[in-house]
Amino acid sequence: MNKEQYMREALQEAEKAREKGEVPIGAVVVLNGEIIGRAHNLRETTNNAITHAEILAIQDACHNQNAWRLEGAELYVTLEPCPMCSGAILLSRIETVYYGAADPKAGTAGTLMNLLQDSRFNHECNVESGILAEECGAILTNFFRDLRARKKQQKES
């Protein structure tokens, strides 16, 4: 598989989130060409602020590898990681992060700030942005547009 194919897997996870009424963000962890972890946002479902796609995909990968270190692994995520997720990425020793859409309000892989490549930390990640950026951005844009329309309709009823 190539980068776009792995990002399409992450987009499939994002679609699962959308179907549940969750913000549609998906992630997959890849090691040696094999997907070892996958997940999507579940904050609304779990009422838990930390159940972001990246965190859950890392947990899945760690469980499947029976290890907390994911050295050599790659993370594909549809939206640029937030500070919490960047922390988990660094602590799990993921080597490379590929993301689709930039997040100007909370992105910490180069947009708002760059935690993943800050040499003051004990680990740094390679980062590549813009993988299927239009598709990754569109699923979010459409979700929030539909959410605003539903809220407006509820107010009017």
Image (cartoon, rainbow, N blue to C red):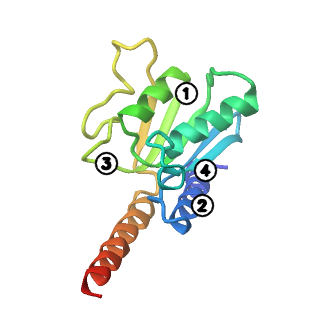
Give me the C-alpha separation between circle 2 and circle 3.
20 Å
Q: Position of residue 41 (x, y in %)?
A: 51, 51
Which three-letter amino acid code belongs to the residue tagged 2?
Answer: Gln
Give me the C-alpha separation between circle 4 and circle 3.
20 Å
Is 18 on the left or on the right of 61, as rendered? left
Q: Secondary structure at mark 3?
A: loop
Closer to the chain start, of discs 2 and 3, is 2
Which three-letter amino acid code belongs to the residue tagged 1?
Answer: Ile
Give me the C-alpha separation between circle 2 and circle 1.
21 Å
Residue at the spot of label 1: 94
Is 138 on the left or on the right of 21, as rendered? left
Q: Position of residue 9 (x, y in %)?
A: 62, 55
Q: Looking at the image, which residue is at 44% across and 35% down?
A: 85
Q: Position of residue 90 (x, y in %)?
A: 47, 23
Residue at the spot of label 3: 103
Q: Position of residue 86 (x, y in %)?
A: 42, 31
Residue at the spot of label 4: 6
Q: Secondary structure at mark 4?
A: helix
Q: Secondary structure at mark 2?
A: helix
Question: Which dot, 1 or 4, sits closer to the camera?
Answer: 1
Question: Which dot, 4 or 3, sits closer to the camera?
Answer: 3
Circle 3: is it few (<14), some (14-19), or many (20+) Cα within 10 Å?
A: some
Residue at the spot of label 2: 12
In terms of image quadrants, where is residue 117? top left
Q: Looking at the image, which residue is at 62% across and 49% down?
A: 2
Give me the C-alpha separation between circle 1 and circle 4.
16 Å
In terms of image quadrants, where is residue 19? bottom right
Which three-letter amino acid code belongs to the residue tagged 4?
Answer: Tyr
Which three-letter amino acid code belongs to the residue tagged 3?
Answer: Asp
